[in-house]
Image: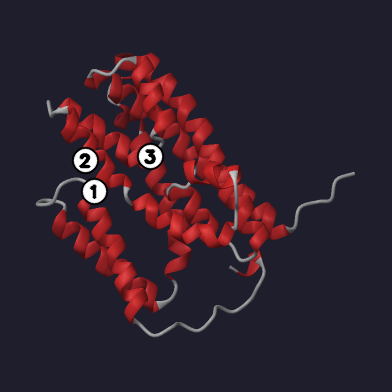
Amino acid sequence: MSRPLAPEVSAAVRQGAGVAVATGLYGISFGALAVVAGLSVAQTAALSLLLFSGGSQFALIGVVAAGGSPLAAVATSTLLGARNMLYGAVVSPLLSLHGWRRAVAAQVTIDESTAVAVGQRTPAAVRAGFWTAGVGVFVLWNAFTLVGALAGDALGDPRAWGLDAAAGAAFLALVWPRLAERRAQAVAGLAVVVTLALVPVAPAGIPVLAAAGVAIVVGATAPAAPPPATGTEADR
């Protein structure tokens, strides 16, 4: 008989699975919009399989749909995807992986897997949350991308189904509990101000990187915060 999972690990798995489902369903929207923008079903599926970064993928097809050059599309997508390097720096010491496992982890280091991982309190829960969210999103995102691409115009505007809000809502649910401290609230507020100021004037990707830069600057210059109080999952 297998040993039951520790409560914090079970909670991390449930959290990761919930995020994976919400984010994966959003893949329908990407698949449909990519085909409408002029990509073939095969190109759309390959983009999700190889690039696997929702924001970068939407940025790419946005440039394509607007008639931009392939170089502009790739540059915009790459710029927005640069944030994943920051995520890698965060989760790498938490996971302590080597060899092929490190390469696999790099492919599934995304917004959702990082958010779930850093929200846990034990090493086992960090690993469980990261892999459940990362692999879960990868599988479901690619599956539903294909569904959306095959459906194409039959779905109409995917935003009418609310799929554009599902991933954002799930991510907000992960971030919200971590804003209890005043420092976190101040950083989040400043990041929002910087993002809103840059969105109308900066290329896609710059506002996201600037918002991440706010957290980096604050973390590098502010005095260290006291360690969080210990507690169980039920205490959160």
Residue 24 seen in render: yes
SS under mark 3: loop
Q: Nearer the viewer, residue 91 or 191?
A: 91
Q: Percent position (x, y) of residue 43? A: 34, 19
Q: Nearer the viewer, residue 160 or 132?
A: 132
The amino acid type of the residue labelled 3 equals Ser
The part of the image, by quadrant, that contains residue 209 is bottom left
Q: Earlier in the sequence, mark 3 or mark 2?
A: 3
Q: Earlier in the sequence, mark 2 or mark 1?
A: 2
Identify the residue position indicated by label 2 in the image: 76
Please say if the residues under marks 2 and 1 sit with CB atoms less than 8 Å apart.
yes
Q: Quadrant of the C terminus?
A: bottom right
Q: Badge 2 local density, few (<14 within 10 Å), some, or many (20+)?
A: many
Q: Percent position (x, y) of residue 5? A: 76, 53
Please say if the residues under marks 3 and 2 sit with CB atoms less than 8 Å apart.
no
Identify the residue position indicated by label 1 in the image: 205
Identify the residue position indicated by label 3 in the image: 53
Please say if the residues under marks 1 and 3 sit with CB atoms less than 8 Å apart.
no
Q: Badge 1 local density, few (<14 within 10 Å), some, or many (20+)?
A: many
* Residue at 9% over, 52% down: 201
> Rounded to the nearest whole Å, what is the CA distance between mark 1 and mark 3?
12 Å
* Residue at 45% over, 82% down: 225
